[in-house]
Amino acid sequence: MPNYKKQKGCQTMVRRSFLLLIGFLIFKGLKAFFSIAENRDRTLQLINQFKQTYFSERFATTPPTPQSSISTPTIVKTPILNTPTPQPLIIPNSPSPSPNNSAVLLNGIQPVQILQKTLFGIPFYQTIINLTDPENLITIGLANNAPQANSSQKSFGDESFLNFVKRYPAAVVANGTFFSKDAQKRVMGNIVGEGKFLKYSRWENFGTTLGLKAGNRPEMITTRLEGKPEWNQHWFSLTCGPRLIKQGKIWLAPKTEGFNDPHVLDRGYRTAIGFSQTGKELFLVSFLASLTLQQEAEVMKTIGCYEAMNLDGGASEGLAYHGDMYINPGRNLTNVIVIYDRNYPAPTQLKTAWKQFQAGQRPLIPINS
């Protein structure tokens, strides 16, 4: 064989051996990298952010509609990847608007609506509730239609978000407050729904409470700094946190409120709720990207919140609008926020309870609590 052919064959073998060695080293490196759950979770977040950057409309102000609805028989969940808070499945908006989104105004008041927006590069859904409209009623939904929220004494378990959406034919259904990850599924904080206590402890002393009083007048109170709320004056009351906005300014003191869980303090998918300075508008925001508490607070301030607080998030983040799934949680939930309007009216018993509350009936504090 001529020498030049031998040399060429030898060079080819060396090149192939080198490429095989490089490929083997890359494989070993990736295997070691993805063997760490935190790295897998971080990579998944980057992939989600990349998808949202290229597939969501920036600065959109028209109501989005999802590609799939609750009639779909199965719920696709993102892999848990051995992490305590898997990312929620985010269902992108479909091309055509929902017919009820363009409802005719009644006395200048628009029904509950959702807008898709992007601020500071962060995409989110903004639900807007006009609190001056008597048809806009807010309540709490509990897993398995339980008469009270899970506590250390009694638990009614959890339930898929799909079941919540089917059971409550409301304008909006969204995730609520935190709950424990053990078998008891204890719901955190005191809860009032439909003018009655769903969970109460006189020893409650952490987090921030959003309460709606007579006439749907909102208030926000951080217990350890401002004293305990008058829960028995609330039609709707939810304790969560940390607080994000106080009197129009960013206010973050999570450890002072009693929060130490890194899943709350670190970056993650989030939901927030707040109201305007006039107290006439309530904003529920479901974020479509992983972000910090500081970033969450900046968005809530920019959209016009005078007071705002963080809600449960991560794998618990869920949002349905007009019966359609917008964000599907990665786990079962114990409690949800349910919002009715005149297009998706509240059931008769809820309207009756609302009238009684307006007439002066108040929640009775449970005995031996």
Image (cartoon, rainbow, N blue to C red):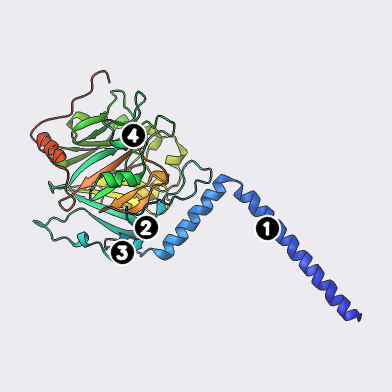
Which quadrant is the C terminus positioned in?
top left
Tell me the amino acid under the disc marked 3.
Ala
Residue ID for mark 2: 123
Which of the marked residues, 3 or 4, is nearer the chain's N terminus? Answer: 3
Q: CA distance from mark 2 to mark 1?
A: 34 Å
What residue is shown with label 3? 60
Q: Is residue 160 visible?
A: yes
| Element under disc 1 | helix
Quadrant of the rendered image containing residue 228:
top left
Q: Quote the CA–CA distance across marks 4 and 2.
A: 26 Å
Which callout, 4 or 2, points to the residue nearer the camera?
2
The answer to whether residue 194 is above or below residue 344 is above
Q: Quadrant of residue 27?
A: bottom right
Please state which of residues 189 and 300 is positioned toward the viewer in this rendering: 189
Disc number lying in front (2 or 1): 1
Amino acid residing under circle 2:
Pro
Q: Position of residue 31 (x, y in %)?
A: 64, 51
Label 2 vs label 3: CA separation?
10 Å
Q: Position of residue 78 (x, y in %)?
A: 46, 50
Assign a secondary structure to mark 4.
loop
Q: From mark 3 to mark 4, how far is it between C-alphas?
A: 33 Å
Which badge, 4 or 2, is on the more N-terminal residue?
2
What kind of residue is marked 1? Ile
Q: Earlier in the sequence, mark 2 or mark 1?
A: 1
Question: Secondary structure under badge 3?
Answer: loop
Q: Vertically, is 365 above or below 280? A: above
Nearer to the camera, 207 or 277:
207
Mark 3 or mark 1, which is nearer the start of the sequence?
Answer: 1
Q: Which residue is mark 4?
A: 207
